[in-house]
Image (cartoon, grey):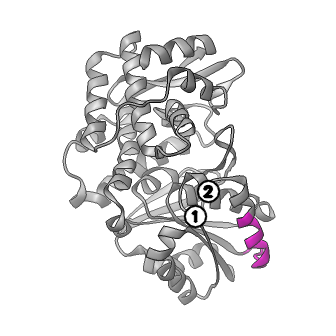
Amino acid sequence: MRSVSVYTSREYTVYIGGGLLSEAGGRIMAVCGGETAALITDDIVNKLYGDAAERSLRAAGYAVARFVFPHGERSKTMETYTAILRALAQAKLTRQDVLVALGGGVVGDMAGFAAASYLRGIGFAQLPTTLLSMVDSSVGGKTAVDLPEGKNLAGAFYQPHIVLCDYETLDTLPAEIFNDGCAEMIKHGVILSAELFAILKEPMQSNMEDIITRNITIKRDVVTADEHETGIRKLLNFGHTLGHGIEKHSDYSVPHGSAVAIGMVLASRGAARAGFCDQECHLEITEAVRRYHLPTATDITPDQLIDAAFFDKKRSGKRITLILPERIGKCAAKDFSLDEFADFVRLAV
């Protein structure tokens, strides 16, 4: 087992190892205490791991209230968020109790937002079960729900108290969902670690503990330096502005990692054509995306991507920031007017 300490407004530890789900209750109790644990999950993860997680929590002394919602981004709404809050109230959770998110990024984002806002903040533990949520969304404290106008427009920064990454849960992931998480690892390599980018050229299945730990360490270093995304943390948005537009206009039929993969390819192509990086950088990113069987193109039109940017969190007034590669392992934030952004998107697509 490995561990990574995160030093933000709330210090916490991320544990990475096999079999951690069975230890979850005891580890959460040691950090969070409390009497009741609200176990929040989706219908797919619930069938696979809901009973095991509840057994572990009960063995540690918790009373458990389980809330299950339909899987997928289409459930990441204010309606589901409100239903979670009401379930917490009906279970009579207090500020000393804990909310446990069991699942992927959608579960973690919504459960985290509920934990941040119920009684103005209760204990929060993350049990990520997808590669994407292990290496990215479970660490750093971003919580949110989607609005009809765009992705993640309502939320809060709320750090978990503990994160437990049991990589044995990855064994039940469909290949396409596993690959979806690889997009975020490619992103980490492009923005900050040429070494990680090179490692990802080799098979990773026998080295999951090390690979996950490397990615979490990169994410930790970024959020420790910039918890509320005013500086270096913006680098983590590489591929995301265009990716979020693809998600929105596909009605979320394109999953997050796949959309980010396309966003990275488009952003690097535009960067190469605009002279921010060389063509080889774009080709390396494209090849990395293809290596993990992720898409490199979209039917979403440039005008639709431009329209989506008006509702993107990275927009400030009449300007928007894009993260563009200079070379593998180094990206930079580029500030565009909305007209310049539109020209860039047409150049990239």
Q: Left of 99 or right of it: where is 282?
A: left
| The quarter of the displayed image where residue 10 is located | bottom right
Asked if residue 228 is among those painted magenta in the image, a careful observer would answer no
As drawn, 309 above or below 206: above
Secondary-structure class at tag 2: helix
Kindly check if marks 2 and 1 are in contact, taking CB atoms under 8 A apart as contact. Answer: yes
| The quarter of the displayed image where residue 21 is located | bottom left
As drawn, 130 above or below 295: below
Q: Residues within 10 Å of mark 2 (few under 14, many from 20)?
A: some
Instruction: Please name the residue that numbered disc 2 is placed on.
Output: 75
Q: Left of 219 or right of it: where is 35?
A: right
Instruction: Please name the residue that numbered disc 1 is placed on.
Output: 70
Q: Position of residue 267 (x, y in %)?
A: 43, 24
In depth, the one of 169 and 16 nearer the eye is: 169
Residue ID at (69%, 48%)? 155
Q: Is residue 188 visible?
A: yes
The C terminus is located in which quarter?
Answer: top left
Q: Which contiguous range is marked in magenta?
A: 83-96
Q: Is residue 95 visible?
A: no
Residue type at tag 1: Pro
Among the two numbered marks 2 and 1 on one chain, the one whose residue lies closer to the N terminus:
1
Q: Position of residue 146 (x, y in %)?
A: 65, 46
